[in-house]
Amino acid sequence: MNSKATDTGADSIVLIGMPGAGKSTLGILLAKELGMGFVDTDVTIQVREGKTLQQILEDSDYMNLRKIEEQVLLSEDIANKVVATGGSAAYSEAGMARLKESATVVFLDVTLEELGNRITNFESRGIARRPDQSLESLFEERRKLYKKYADIAVDCDQQSLEQSLKSVIQQLL
């Protein structure tokens, strides 16, 4: 498997991308296919905080959610796991540096149009963004970061889950 983690003894895969790109769903299937553990950092945040992402946003703000996310990225055990990150993980330089040290980072790339079809709850989904920020603005801002950190980019647009899974595995091998 293509991995920079050989010297640390950990072979991990980190999935990054926009909300609705399929990181959590594809991550579970990828972990099962490769016989690895699975971590969803959004779930870790919710369990740790005892609140949904949307409740965290309502109780504080998007910058607090990003701070909590960074703490999880810096502390979560990711050894030999597939990690589905939150869409805003790429804002954390320290978090992404840690993940890149021991994992292959895979960007699940989906067009803005397709994300618009997949995300029907943009206002209430618990997305760490400025209150006035549109999906289009968020997409443009984050896409640059995803490309910056990705070791591999997989076009998951107009593909079934099974096709996306095969594409990811092909690029990893």
Image (tube, rainbow, N blue to C red):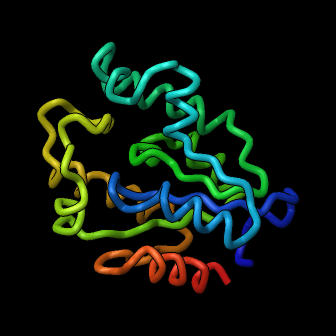
Quadrant assignment for the C terminus: bottom right
Residue 59 against residue 130 in the figure, above or below? above
Q: Indicate the position of residue 100 as horizontal and vertical percent values.
A: 64, 56
Q: Position of residue 122 (x, y in %)?
A: 20, 44
Residue 99 image position (x, y, % from top left)? 64, 51
- Locate the N terminus and report the quarter of the image it occupies: bottom right
Image height of 51 relative to 79, above or below = above
58 or 118, which lies in front?
A: 118
Residue for point 70% across, 77% down = 2
- Asked whether, in this view, residue 131 is left or right of residue 98, the answer is left
Give the residue drawn at x 51%, y 65%.
26
* Residue plotted at (52% across, 19% down): 49
Q: Number of callouts in the render? A: 0
**Quarter of image, res 35:** bottom right
Residue 105 % position (x, y): 57, 63
As drawn, 31 above or below 50: below
Front residue of 160/56: it is: 160
